[in-house]
Image (spheres, rainbow, N blue to C red):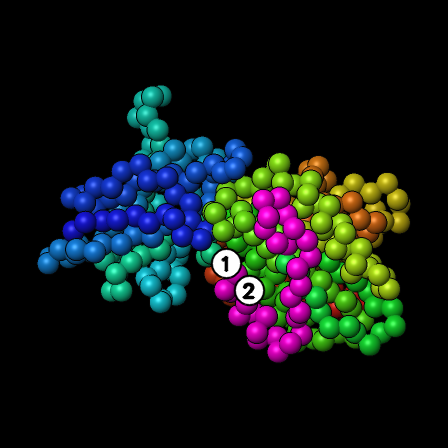
Amino acid sequence: MSLRVLNRFPGANAAVLSVDDRAREIVFAPEPRPGADALWFHFRVADPQPPAERPDALRVRLAFADSVAGGGAVPLRPVYREKGANWLRARPPAAVPAKTPADVPALVWDLPYPPREGSLDVALDVPYGAEDLAATVRRSNGFWTETAAGLLAGGAVLRRLSSGQPPSPSPRALYVAARRDPAAAPASWVLDGMLEAFSRAKSAKWRVWAAPLADPAGAERGASGPDPAAAPRLRALLAADFARCAAGARPELYLDLDAAPPGGGVRAAAAPCADGAAEKSARAWTNLFAQALAPDFADAASFADAAPAPAGVFPDVPVPRVSLRVPFGRVLDAWLAPRQYREIGQRLAKAVLGRW
């Protein structure tokens, strides 16, 4: 048995601290790149020389558990899958508490091993990449058109999806951006559900544009948080693209999709509005989304007095701006799979389409 841990593929993030073939144990921690956050991880375990007498478990140990984003308030349950299989959610971890002030807490999971196909992927939550988005666009049968919307810091291209021109002479316009935080995989699955619902409805009243991977380079390198240095350029590009979307339309909402640490419901944050009418409209949107997601994905506390969004979340656009944050994995009392994330998106899309 000779365990190998692979962490150099698209979306990967894991600092491998030790690999013990005899104990069948891997110790790792997510790297805080580029900023201070450290939560996202995704790595692959391979065993090119499995032993004749095969073990029945692989022990995966997350070091420095008290310093991951969210502070470990909710026990993490990562996902894993064998090559070509579906993602499965791990059982709750065994905690390794600090025995003395000098000790470092850890979380431990025992995963089935070895895999039948030679490798096992482990991630904080189900990853979502460019290939998943491409499959959704193909299923729309031409409803979504992908366009290059601008060049981001470092040379990455911001790509945007646009719906077909609705027959209404002055359609309402919605702009959605996801993955401003490149690690926010739940946001991508929610947007995936929205894209499908909009493509099925083919609304005559709405023009919908979406930036599904607002930080594609960060998602590619497994970044565990947004890059503060790149944020001004991204906001400028999103503002310019929103203006294109709003041309000849009635712009109604800019929606940001983000992730949050596990636990609680889907949360809302709105941009401060100096204009009274825009403030009232933002409250109406948050109330509408709260009703759409209750009681399965949001409760009274999720949207009550929606907190103002931090500076830098939104581009400067003249419409209500709302950010929805979807917890990694656990929403209220349930651990979610892509199907439930996509249901959140479908409910949001139906709420938008049904407002007028």
From mark 1 to mark 2, how far is it between C-alphas? 8 Å
Magenta-colored stretch includes residue 8: no
- Residue at coordinates 77% horizontally, 72% vertically from top-left? 165
Rendered location of residue 299, percent (x, y): 63, 52
Q: Is residue 236 left or right of residue 91?
A: right
Q: Which residue type carries mark 2? A: Leu
Cβ atoms at labels 1 and 2 below 8 Å apart = yes
Rendered location of residue 25, percent (x, y): 24, 44
Q: Earlier in the sequence, mark 1 or mark 2?
A: 1
Magenta-colored stretch includes residue 142: yes
Q: Which residue is mark 2?
A: 133
Q: Which residue is mark 1?
A: 128
Q: Is residue 281 left or right of residue 349?
A: right
- Residue at coordinates 32% horizontally, 25% vertically from top-left? 103
Asked which quadrant contains residue 356, the reply is bottom right
Rendered location of residue 50, percent (x, y): 17, 56
